[in-house]
Amino acid sequence: MSFELNYQYLRSIKHILTDHNKTKHYHGKCPFCKSIIEFAEVFTSPTKVGYDFTVSELNEKGIMIGQCHNYNCRYYFKLEVFNPDLSCFNSGATKKDNYIYVDNETKKIDEYEFIKPMEEIIDTNNIFKNKNDNYNFDNHPLYVCNTCERNVEPIAYNYLEKKWDKISEKYWNYIDWSLGKGGASSPKNIVINLPIHCPCGNQHIAKFVSRYHESIDFNEHEFSLLDVYGSKPLTEHVFAVHSKTRIMNWLYKLIARWNFLFDKIYVISPFVSYQYADKDLRVKTWLEILNRPDPLKSLISTKSKEVNSFKNAFSEINEISYKELESYGLGSNLIEFVKKNNKFHAKVYCGISNSVCEVLSGSVNITEGPTQEVINFNRIFDSKKAYDMFLKPLGIDDISTELNTLNTREYSLFFDEERDFSPIEFYKKDYIDYIINNIIPKPRVI
């Protein structure tokens, strides 16, 4: 049941009523220097106290005072929000003060009366920031049994679901230990090593990856397959003539693998979507490829008109133009740094590190459809040779001298059923040996 509380007491416990699911995120511009400022408007909800009582929500409008972080600005500004006592700036500014209208704080109202308000604000649109980790386990398998050629991906996923309770117990112990330790950087991913059996009798080892979350909820983890040891070699399976749709789905799955395995990813295609594709299809095709590669390690190369066509199509089918999103820092980093090349016809998709490179190449542009195309998968154990063969002719800069130093401190958590899923900190230097050579890492147990 609900009951009334003294208003001042309700105010004192207001933080307990915070509902994170209602929090609204915005991007705004400093009214002086136009620097991008991110802020969160926090709301409360009725909250159950004990077994029988529900405390009502308390959402009050007021003013939040911020100071711009730009060294050449540093001016104060004001912003009208609900619950300014709970709301905050996430980046670009520091919260300096706040007041709530119903308190009628005359001194603060007078003090801040002539401070300039932030007026350029939009809801945070994460269409280019939300990572697409959707891995299709049921169709277009990248990994098939080497004996019967059955799709082993859904079999692997079913094994993972059945083992998750045991994994999550060990996972939670690590999270609890890590939070107590404090200070150190978190793992980037979790990796799960899981023996599976094909109905034909063959045993394989499925290697899963998901981004590290401080949550053990299975549904919050978007799992992808890094590899299935004992499956048909990719050089034999990803080969010959197949439909555009199948090849693109293979590429999506390879990108999930490459995000983990390699230092750089290149997506090189003269065309994205069909020449006469409608605006919705053009935008959908671009989004499929933009939100999968890690933007910090990836480069897209295409013809300049393809980028312009995408921006125009996006602007026409959405309420906000791509240019306006960019002005708030909400555009795609891959679009911002795309390498435009109007004089090539090759289609090359690859992941590369210092010691090895994997290349998907053939006749298919970035587009799905039933048309048949030729495709080849190659693995080259010489990054300089791979660069000279596939990237240099397409005008891609040589970064071979940088490959030894990229992301050297990155690590993941490794859960192996053979070790009863006790977590191991698994460092980047061992990633390639694990995925390609099936050498199980042996760092210290946590």
Image: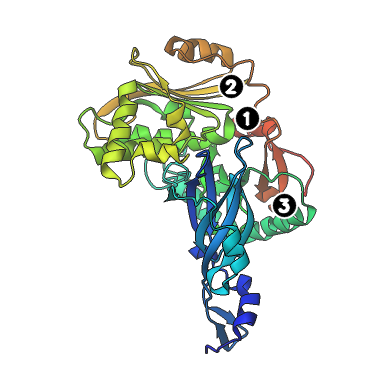
On screen, 9 above or below 212? below
**Which image quadrant is residue 441 in?**
top right
Distance between the Cα atoms at labels 3 and 2?
A: 30 Å
* Residue assigned mark 1: 432
In the rendered view, does 320 fall on the left or right side of 60? left
What percent of the width, then of the height, locates residue 67?
61, 48
* Residue assigned mark 2: 356
* Among the two numbered marks 1 and 3 on one chain, the one whose residue lies closer to the N terminus: 3
The amino acid type found where label 3 is placed reads Ser
The amino acid type found where label 1 is placed reads Ile
* Residue assigned mark 3: 422
- Pick whichever, 134 or 289, lies toward us: 289
Residue positioned 34% across, 21% down in the render: 304
On screen, 105 above or below 422? below
- Pick whichever, 133 or 97, lies toward us: 97
* Among the two numbered marks 2 and 1 on one chain, the one whose residue lies closer to the N terminus: 2
- Pick whichever, 13 or 392, lies toward us: 13
- Badge 1 marks a residue whose secondary structure is helix
The amino acid type found where label 2 is placed reads Val
| Residue 42 seen in this snapshot | no
Count neighbours of disc 2 (C-alpha within 10 A) and say few if under 14, some if 14 to 19, many if 20 or more. Answer: some
